[in-house]
Image (spheres, rainbow, N blue to C red):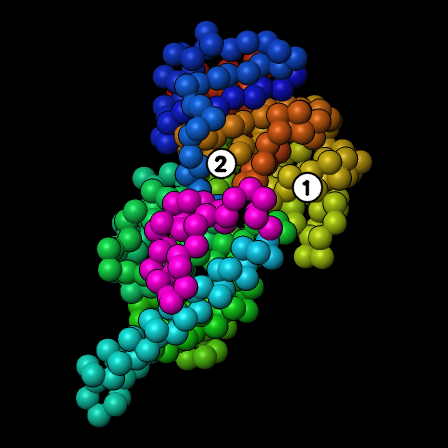
Amino acid sequence: MALVQRIPNFSSNLRNWKSTNSTNHKPVSSLHYKTQITASSSSPFTEKHSVERYQRDQWLYKASTPSPSPPSPNQQDEVFVRENDIASQLPELKKLLEVLREKRESGCRGGDCGPGDVYLVGTGPGDPELLTLKAVRVIQSADLLLYDRLVSNDVLELVAPDARLLYVGKTAGYHSRTQEEIHELLLSFAEAGATVVRLKGGDPLVFGRGGEEMDFLQQQGIRVQVIPGITAASGIAAELGIPLTHRGVATSVRFLTGHSRKGGTDPLFVAENAADPDTTLVVYMGLGTLPSLAQKLMDHGLPCDTPAVAVERGTTPLQRNVFAELKDFATEIQAAGLVSPTLIIIGKVVELSPLWPHCTKESSCLVESR
């Protein structure tokens, strides 16, 4: 049996939520919890075709050509969007660089000016209230911010009015900028004296390629500061009441990537020791490779009734969860139609969540200890 539900609030209290919504579920092959969220609700994340993104980044499109309107459905082709974005943005990016260079030179004595700083800032899993105070301060003081797809619109509202925003998001099959282009953008603006902030969902150094950007910039003599964010594993597990480690249940936790660098349906690795029943497995970017991952884990000895949960758009108003045992997990996720970004947690700790559909000895012990 699986459990599928939405959670309506950014920082919901699980006990209150459960008590007030327990009468709303309807058994339809699995348990479904529904809220008042409608189909017209906008995504809290910045998508490549987002109307809000074009409005927010309209400074990029003030070149001699008319500002582009958001692509219509028949234009939502990665080649069209990429060519249109780059053609429109490059003239304004060059102008901005020139302004920054002139500003730096006019404020320097004897031409001795060092480069600006680059901050790699983690924005957490989506809920803006999970930002650190340091992250908010840096976001509000930046000259230019390069942001990813999974940075929520609420976080972007914190950016100062005179700062510039540049979308460099990536999703499967579509990269608005290559990683090499992102490196060059960070370097160019830092060399022009700007305070540059690189906004990343979650934590910059947990499957965020922050290490690559840091290494590249440091080799070019640019000072880089990393401001950590709450990674999706911690934020989403806390939202569901799942302890990633728990005495007598899970003695360790492992973060895995479901992506293969060369693509394909197989996970990057599934070593035999990944199937340790006393370890919590957290899989990032694992929707496409989950069927293979689940089967390999069971082949290596992980019990087929191991509890698991998949969480789409965790900690946001559009959060959806699918709870199921490992043997049914991939099928239930497919039936629910979950999409990226989805985080996967596999392990006995999942049944400690008050949302787990089965009453267990472990969950009873956890409630008694509170």
Q: Secondary structure at mark 2?
A: loop
Instruction: Identify the residue under disc 2.
Output: 313
Q: Residue at x 52, y 68 (%)?
A: 181
The quarter of the rendered structure image containing the N terminus is: top right
The quarter of the rendered structure image containing the C terminus is: top left
Mark before the other along the chain sequence, 2 or 1? 1
Q: Residue at x 32, y 39 (%)?
A: 129
Q: Residue 135 at x, y = what percent?
A: 31, 53
Q: Give amino acid for label 1.
A: Gly
Q: Residue 147 at x, y = what percent?
A: 42, 55
Q: Residue at x 70, y 42 (%)?
A: 289
- The answer to whether residue 81 of the structure is visible from this angle is yes
Q: Would residue 53 be counted in the magenta stretch?
A: yes
Q: Give amino acid for label 2.
A: Arg
Which of these two is toward me, 167 or 12? 167
Q: Residue 205 at x, y = what percent?
A: 49, 56
Q: Is residue 181 left or right of residue 221?
A: right
Span highlighted in magenta in the image: 48-77
Report crowding for label 1: few under 14, some 14 to 19, many 20 or more residues within 10 A (C-alpha).
Answer: some
Instruction: Identify the residue under disc 1.
Output: 288
Which quarter of the picture shows residue 362?
Answer: top right
